[in-house]
Amino acid sequence: MNKDAQEQRLIREAEHATLQMYTRRHFLKEGAMGFGALAFGSLLGSCGFGPSSASNTIFDASNPLAPKPPMFPGKAKSVIYLHMAGAPSQLEMFSYKPELAKLDGQECPQSLLEGKKFAFIRGVPKMLGPQANFRQHGKSGLWLSDNLPHLATVADEIAMLNAVTTDQFNHAPAQLLMHTGSPRLGRPSIGAWVTYGMGSENKNLPGFVVLTSGGNNPDAGKSVWGSGFLPSVYQGVQCRGEGDPVLFIKDPEGMDRDLRKASIEAINKINQKQFEEYQDPEILSRIAQYEMAYKMQISVPEVMNINDEPAYIHEMYGTEPGKTSFANNVLLARKLVEKGVRFVQLFDWGWDTHGTSASGSVDIGLVNKCRSVDKPITALILDLKQRGLLDETLVVWGAEFGRTPMQENREGKDLPFKGRDHHAGAFNMWMAGGGIKGGTSYGETDEIGYDIVNGKTEAFDIQATILNQLGFEHEKLTFESQGRPFRLTDVGGKVITQIVA
Amino acid sequence: MVQFSSKKIGVLFVLLLAVGALYKLALSNQKVDYNIHVKPIINKKCISCHGGVKQEAGFSLLFQEEALGPTESGKPAIIPGDPEASELIRRITEKDPAERMPYKHEALSEEEIEVFRQWIKEGAKWGQHWAYVSVKKQDIPDFKNSWIRNDIDKFIYEKLKEQKLEPAVEADKPTLLRRLSLDLIGLPALEAISKKYLQDNSEKAYENLVDDLLASPRYGERWTSVWLDLARYADTRGYEADRGRVIWKYRDWLIRAYNADKPYNDFLIEQLAGDLMPNPDDAKYIATAFHRNTMTNDEGGTDNEEFRTAAVMDRVNTTWSATMGTSFNCVQCHSHPYDPFKADEYYKFMAFFNNSRDEDTNADYPLLRQYNPQDSMKLVRLTAWLKNNSSAELAKKYVDFLKTWQPTINSLQCDQFVNAALISSWFAGLRNNGTCRLKDVVLQDKTQLMFRYKTNFDGGKWSIYLDALNGKLLKTIPLPNTKGAWEIVSVPIPSETGKRDLFFKYFSPAIKNPDDTGVQFEWFNFDVPFPGKGKPGYGIALKMFDELMHAKVDETPIMIENNQDQFRSTHIFERGNWMVKGNKVEPGVPAIMNPMPSNVPKNRLGMALWLTDKRNPLVARTMVNRVWEQLFGAGLAETLEDLGSQGIAPTHQELLDHLSWQFMNEFNWSMKRLLKEIVLSASYRQSSAVTEEKLRIDPNNKFYSRASRIRLSAEQLRDQALEVSNVLSKKMYGPSVMPFQPEGIWLSPYNGEKWKMSQGEDQYRRAVYTYLKRTAPYPSMMTFDGSSRESCLPRRIRTNTPLQALTSLNDSTTLVISRSLAFRMKILGGKESINQISKGYEAMMFKPITSKKLKALSDLYEEALKKYKKDKNAIVRLMGAKDKPADPETASLVVVAGALLNMDEWLNKN
């Protein structure tokens, strides 16, 4: 980022901060302490925001999830973000590099290594040719490897980003950068920003839901769906495929629904008495939250239950009820956006193919991982489309970085399986639906997929584009913290207009 | 719509205030005050182009010398005393939009222009923002009436009068008892204390209660949990792997410090620089763990220097945020856009922290090594021998070394690896014939090399060359097979001169596979040999030294300063980028603040003494403001994190200053005396009931015409529930515990660590002892706005969400507590369910239940009873253990107990 841009940013933020000092902050403060009797009206669902007021989005602690219109009418109403944690190899999936095949087994030229840092490669590694066959698909002629036979059938729905780049080559910071705009902890995640900006449409469900698969949480932990300095109400709610779908959603053993209902009624009656005594509007807010909790106890298990989906849907997605799997999570994502959830974030762990084991190799493990996601992702696109939801649902597929065209030689040694090290320089992501132009691609890398030739795309650009599709100017969705306004895209970000319909 | 109008009212209100202030000024002919009148306009209308980041036309309004100095045009824009000659006035009154300021923005109002004009006329006097001016003794407003109990009330009463508000009556005794207990000890008072208070009708009853609570050991636990957010204390290291870190002794230090009422200035000095105080004991070292709560990154391939630097910057930011209510981190990239800090001042301040020994090592070095009693005796004997046979100075050096393994050089400082590598980013590892370099080692007068290494091969030899691989051979050292275990060895080395680069080469004939790593080093120490050779007892002393080096010890990360040999110089990072180093800087404090006291060293200790100097304008105010927030729900200056010009101005600045002055000068930094002063006030003791009129005039209770109702913290909620149900463990101190947590919360990659449920009473310890994993904190605490402790959190924002309802309804801890509470209710209330319910409520709230609330609960009881009479199976499931009496009545009482634990009045301070 150049100096001017940074200055411009700081100035804008300074202006913003001073202007808002007496508006948003003032209300944040009031909200946090309870709005007073007047504000309780908002609990009844009133909405006093004009279309342009979202840049001043106000946090109202008495009803922080009230639906709010975005800054301008967005094409997308919700987002399903599929993150492959560990970073899949673009060279075996999307990035067709015949030249790399010719270089297979040769020592990596010194020019590629100078001034570069790798997580594990030491000394001079050898080049590793693509471990998959590529073919063109659809009218657009999108190159895809044979690892993705299903996705090939929806090639024309996809806008491919060929030249994504990051400056972080370790998982945790790179994931944080991708989802929070900073490689360090403490910033809100994109889903939290969206929920802060738009609220939630479904009063019985959280606005931001997270589903994980692959046996581990992403490396950066829950911070990638955290609320950072935003009020905690905006953090992602992790729903789980096994056990309780939301923590503590189930009534205690031996207490049935009727008794729970009676019990909440008793609690609310007592709280009503308390309100009559003290007149504190926060008490009314608590009464409302207990009602919402009761509703969630029914609606969350309902939406998280895929047993009742028809057989053809299970066949299409490859789902098996009762398990934690990526396929199940993808189907759940569809159900959630159908119910009005704004942001569904999926993390699938296990893409870190260094070559230290068969499951962590690009010729064995990666093929299996592709098999586990190819069918459900394709099903998601087709299913959203057949329900008329694809236009208003933005699907984003990506990871924290890509992998090197060199074979990994950890600590200078050859590894037993074929693997690639982390590569921050260039990798692929794609988007579909939600006002994205299908059958397009943007950006280009060199003939071995190492450096970017044109169309460089950064995490901030992806974030700016997602916000744009939802109807937000990424520079204006801000929140004051530590004495200055922060935004998701920090100091960067430009909407990738080339793929926007 | 209703909400919209409330917003409008707010804006209008603020505008009116602003306009009102200007009008007042115009009408009263009073002098212009820079802070009150000028700075707000500058901040709002000018500073973004003429300030810290940008200085259009060479003109800046951030600092006085800049504002009055020459601009690009060569002449100043402000000429004190002469508004008409001042370019500033010409520009803000200009009609031509190309010339008129603010450029391309709305023109200043006439009132605003008048403020500038009058200000310049009166000499353009610069004023300091209140928070950067030292605290002065305040005049106490002169009020007397039956409500006022102490000076605090006079300040409060004065503002209430201005608002045409009246204070509320004193809350009833039960409410006060619960409020005060939760505030002072974080728990309902013990039965003995509460009985004593409720039965005592004398004038002193309340004050006695305050004293009893302040004397309770629970007091330290309560206030420690507040400090832990600031200290970003956690039991793990953060980032990807987020492995465990054993640092709980620091938490225990805090509890002891609070209970002993350690003066706040000493409390800070010891945490910031205990290691640099004369002859620090273990406790002073452990206090410094405050700044070892920074995160370390264990992920492969990370740059240790990057994360060391991140930790150092975090220490700077935390010091300012926690103790001085200032977001100093803005200054790392540019001069503060609103407050008078210059960018280089950040790095000067950072220089105080840049010479600690920690380097993002695997072991979290430096560590305080604490011996078991037997080994401690050994250490005492060894110390005595060293004193007798060498010198007190040498004895101290060896004791320090045994207690810290410092000074040592971490092997991660090695570079130029050939056929070698920095294994897992921490350990210099060499293969057969592998080489690497260790730069800048001071060899002058060093005749012994001690090092820690491991190898799986026999016959290894390590050759050290001076200055180059083909340089002079210093020594070849045999490296016996340690079978993969770390081993510490000392060898004599020939005497050399100066600071030299060392080149290492390794060979073992036993290595067959060229890919095998032959040896790994952890650290090196170049020094003189153990003293007293030839003196009686030398052999035994040396043996004791060796045994103590290898002893099993408790380890706690602490701060230790680099010695001269390892001194780091500090540079400015250009635009905040640690890779781009600019000018070198010396340690120093920002010019706007109080100067460094004379006679203090220019190191961390000196900085700590500067910080706790009574002239420091921020430290006492920040703590007083925080204590106030804990008791009243919001600070006197609401933005605890920012007292500067971007923070929200205090409602009662004089009161804040009065208490800050008292805190330092009358209470001698005693936290207990400060707390006592505040809670004895009539302002604190008010009822929280609110009238329509008070809600209308002051909806957020900024003027304290009543007590605020405040949702309890995550810690208070857990602790009071455990206490009221009679299961709370009174056990203090020790390793963090793992109470029940649902499966699947901990899922960190590359980390086999598991949540292992604690047994017995450790299940029911206070929240302050709960194990905190940064990437997966205890879920129910997070739901109630707890902190994940990644960085200093100066203020928690309270939320009110359905997830909180789900947690307090359904968390299995709630069920366990409901059962225990039900048993207690049976004991308290005898046979009748009505009595049981009433007594249960009374045990929680210290007062009798009203008939309507009782009816709601007994209706619930009857409904539950109907169910459980028909469904024995449900009783068994609800009650869990089969050995407990499982009759329908008890089960129904458990349901009622669960409802009681969810009452809003229980979740709040009333």
Image (cartoon, coloured by chain):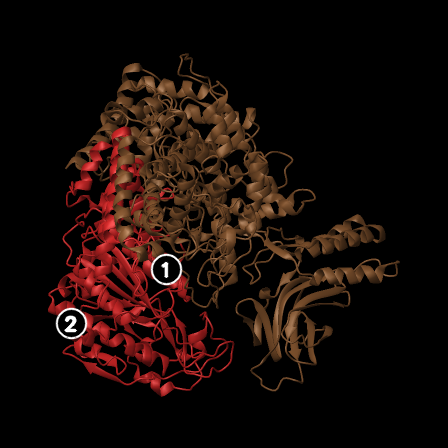
- Count of residue discs: 2
Q: Could you say which quadrant of the image residue B264 lies in? A: top right
Q: Is residue A288 left or right of residue A482?
A: left
Please say if B898 is above or below B163. Answer: below
Mark 2 and mark 1, same subunit?
yes
Label 2 crowding class (10 Å Cα cut-off): few <14, some 14-19, many 20+? few
Determine whether the residue tagged by mark 1 lies in a helix, strand or loop: helix
Residue drawn at the location 42% of the way across and 12% of the way down: B144
* Chain with colour red in the figure: A
Which residue corresponds to mark 1? Answer: A176
Q: Residue at 43%, 29% (x, y): give it.
A: B177
> How far, Cα to Cα, is label 2 from label 1?
37 Å
Location of residue B839 in the rendering, given as x and y in whole percent from the top left corner: 38, 35
Chain under disc 1: A
Q: Nearer the viewer, mark 2 or mark 1?
A: 2
Residue at 73%, 56% (x, y): give it.
B375
User: Residue A335's spot in the image, x, y percent?
Assistant: 19, 63
Residue located beneath label 2 in the image:
A310
Q: Measuring from the top left, give residue A160's x and y in whole percent.
A: 23, 71
Q: Is residue B588 left or right of residue B869?
A: right
Question: From the image, which quarter does the C terminus of chain B lie in?
Answer: top left
Few, some or many C-alpha atoms within 10 Å of disc 1 (few <14, some 14-19, many ≥20)? many
Q: Nearer the viewer, residue A277 or B627?
A: A277
Q: Chain drawn brown, letter?
A: B
Secondary structure category for the residue under label 2 = loop
Q: Amino acid at mark 2?
A: Pro
Q: Which three-letter amino acid code belongs to the residue tagged 1?
A: Leu
Q: Is residue A143 visible?
A: yes
